Amino acid sequence: MTRHVVVVGAGPAGLGAAAAALRAGARVTLVDSAEHPGGQYHRMLPDAYRAARPGRLHHGWDAFDRLRRRVTGHPRCAWWPETSVWMLERSAPGEPRPPRVHVLRGPADGSGRERRVLEPEALVLAPGAHDRALPFPGWDLPGVFTAGAAQALAKGERVVVGDRVVVGGAGPFLLPVAASLLEAGASVAEVLEAGTAAAVARGWGRRPWELASQAGKAGELAGYAALLARHRVPYRTGRAVIEARGDGRVEEAVTARLRADWSVVPGTERTVTADAVCVTHGFSPQLELPVAAGCALRAGATPEEPFVEVDADQLTTAPGVYAAGEVTGIAGAPAARAEGLLAGWLAGGGAPSAPELRRLRARRDQGRAFAARLAAAHPVGAAWPGWLRPGTVVCRCEETDYAALCRAADDAAGGAAARAVKLGTRAGLGPCQARICGPTVAELLRRRAAGAPGRPAEGLAPATPHHRPVAQPIRLGELAEPPRESE
Amino acid sequence: MDATRIVVLGAGIIGAACARELALAGFAVTVAERGAPAAGTTAHGEGNVLVSDKEPGPELELAKLSRRLWPEVLAEIADRARPAAPRAATRTTTRTTTRTTGRTADPVAAVEWDPKGGIVVATTGDGARELERFAAAQRAQGVATETLDAAALAAAEPYATRDFALAVRYPQDAQVQPSGAAAALLADALRAGAVLRTGCEVLGAETAGGRITGVRTSTGTIGADAVVNAAGPWAGETSRRLGAPVDVRPRRGEVLVTAPMPPTVFHKVYDADYVGAVGSGAGDLQASAVVESTRAGTILLGSSRRRVGFDERIRPDVLAVIAAKALRLFPSLAGVPVMRAYGGFRPYVPDHLPVIGADPRLPGLWHATGHEGAGIGLSVGTARILADLILGREPEIDAEPFRADRPAVPLDPAAASGTAAPAEPPEPSQGANP
């Protein structure tokens, strides 16, 4: 029987994995929660728009379009759009099988979703990442967006989030976001990179030869920079949005100059009129499925930002489970595609000795080097919690503020257990299930605990915020119905 | 004179409650916890403080005692946590004062004590007859019950099924947020002088003259005049390491959590077949609907019981059974999204009674475990009984049925080394005992 590979996520990594697994001769089920393949990078307009030029605002559109048609039109590929994986059911310990994949097919807001169970011989996890936003006073005001959400609206819906937008945060993602906003018709007041010019230059300039392999990426960034210049949008380093203000919605942003550790230089605060603020401070990989599959994680820049541990073949520590793309390290679309191709080929039973793998591995390794440089060039400064005030909301779902979090952490007994803090303050227990605030809350608790004298440190190990056995909400009625037979 | 040293193994709710009673009684208490406090079974339940599911017998007596103690204990904790309260100062040791300064939050708010009452619903004729008999027997033992007709059930629970055979309200049933409750009990124990050691795993017992004199742990040996095994489902393994095994096993359970809702479920509502599922000793899946809301607006849906060792995988088919059973009681919840699921292990003993008392084989070792799914509610009563037994006082209720050497708790005969008599009660320190 043909080997069955399930690929979760149809972004650059997942599409690459599906294409390579098909090429290796496997049967592929490709699932994604969106209506179209592409992920965050190649976000497509909904069918309802009947876009004449869907590739506008997109890089590498033609190549992507060919790949997507080849995969979704392949006779051995089942393309399941609008399908969410709500649970991975691990096999018994010692059984070398990947988990069973429990999915819901149909629009998330629709009532007719269908429960299905897949039993693959190999599983490729390519769920991607979402952008991380650090809290600051006023970040919960309407008009503050994560840069990813703003870009998704611009690229996917052609909607701009405001007339006059401040874009701030850290990392090269600031530029494409600003570009998307400009192209969709917004005015961008300024783009603020929190890292100081010296830090950014050090990170990017240390090993310039590594950049050559990602020349496409560099060219892309240069294009964005040119676009910003054309629109006379200032790009400032060492500056951040430290507060958003307004009566019921954003009316102005307060920016300030930062030191290298992201502490605010007193007296440098400036007020900018704006009706929208877009922030991004890097990316959080979507780790709930790898964690549910039993994959070991490796430490990232901080203990709260781990990635999936993979070997040279993209194989995780869980039997038959491969990982590709941003969950293994934030390196952008070309690296994700290389990882996906490698993972898919091997997951599909392709020969590990195939000659084209050497080129793929080299590309993947260059991607990883690039990822390391990105992380080095745009680290989150340790002093960012200095922006917070006692009343600053940290967990938006449950409206837990910074003061409540500190109080719970300082409690003699409760502070000894991150879990007790979580249950006590409900931080991370709301509808987003800690996807937004989890790393932030865990980091604040860890620092708080470290700073408090006379408390045993060993009891303060934070529970992972990525443990979400129910990976996507499922209605009680859907859960109560038996699934359609396995395949 | 130095106080008698007691080491409590486990900082779940049972260990926390025991540490509190013993510290208040003047013992020098150390709580040794392998992981973090309230992170095991305590963090994975629903916070039941129930009399409704207990049939007349020793467990109901313990439940009634605990139900009476809960408000008293919480009032005492609130009282002692106020830094300036002179009344509190007379009851605590001098070590207390530094711990309480700077405390601003209400110390018992996180407990979320809610005497909301329970409603048991029978959906079949057989179930109704059984519930009627059960409730009558409980009534004879002083449990308040109240039969609800269709109008009364609809008024009490507007979203519950109209298709039922019998509904009985139990006004004494209550709920706590279990981690918050354990943290409050533990904080009070620390205020009373107890010391918490986390990341501290039990490796074995130190003995002298057949008596336990200390506990060897991953962070060193802790000298002790008495040791309390409050390790919940891990009590079996812990007791084996101490050389006096008791047969406590894990029994798996899962809970579903919905997205936050406007008020929809107002009591703890459960299916009459719950009592049968609790009382069953079967290893395969026993499931019964238990539905209640929390202060955060989420609805908790239980319950399942499986004997699968410490296998912590959450099984979709078990979640599906829980959902289907819950919808039988609340059909209108079909469109409500489940946001999260968690599972835990109950400490299971074949006769479904906790083990509270001295270990006859190893003088100085005491057990307080085996509460299965009722440990949150029974914690304060258990702690009171244990302290009474350790102090040589007559407990308020008969503790004989809970003893560690009863037939249902097969003590490993190899470990029974001839010392049949229970340990002499050690003396508490002078002056501190109120």
Image: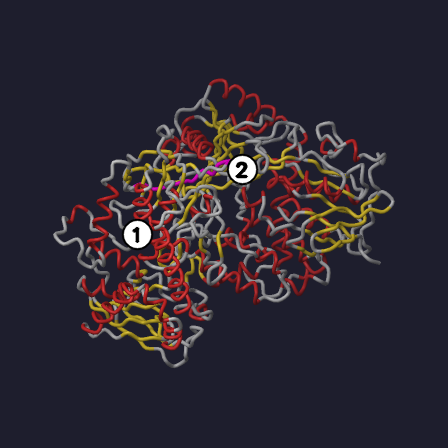
**Residue A314 visible in the shown view:** yes
Q: Residue A98: horizontal and vertical position, in percent?
A: 44, 39
Q: Residue at x 71, y 38 (%)?
A: B356
Q: In the structure shown, which secondary structural element does the residue marked by tag 2 occupy? A: loop
- Tell me the crowding category of disc 2: few under 14, some 14 to 19, or many 20 or more residues within 10 angstroms, Cα based: few
Q: Eyeballing the image, is A26 above or below A270? A: above
Q: Which chain does the numbered disc 2 sit on?
A: A
Q: Eyeballing the image, is B219 above or below B350? A: below
Q: Residue at x 35, y 61 (%)?
A: A140
Of residue B156 and residue B58, the one placed in the foreground of this image is B58
Q: CA separation, marks 1 and 2?
A: 33 Å
Q: In the structure shown, which secondary structural element does the residue marked by tag 1 occupy? A: helix
Q: Residue A194: horizontal and vertical position, in percent?
A: 37, 71
Horizontally, residue B296 falls left or right of residue A345, namely right
Identify the residue position indicated by label 1 in the image: A12
Identify the residue position indicated by label 2 in the image: A94
Q: Which residues are magenta?
A: A83-95
Residue A84 counted in the magenta span: yes
**Residue B267 visible in the shown view:** no
- Tell me the crowding category of disc 1: few under 14, some 14 to 19, or many 20 or more residues within 10 angstroms, Cα based: many
Q: Which chain does the numbered disc 1 sit on?
A: A
Q: Residue at x 57, y 54 (%)?
A: A417
Do marks 1 and 2 share a chain? yes
Horizontally, residue B356 falls left or right of residue A155, namely right
Looking at the rendered structure, the kind of residue marked 1 is: Pro
Of residue A360 and residue B130, the one placed in the foreground of this image is A360
Q: Eyeballing the image, is A364 above or below A229? A: above
> The N terminus of chain B appears in which quarter of the rendering?
bottom right
User: Which badge, 1 or 2, comes first in the chain's sequence?
Assistant: 1
Horizontally, residue A19 falls left or right of residue B109, namely left
Picture quadrant of residue B59: top right
Looking at the rendered structure, the kind of residue marked 2 is: Gly
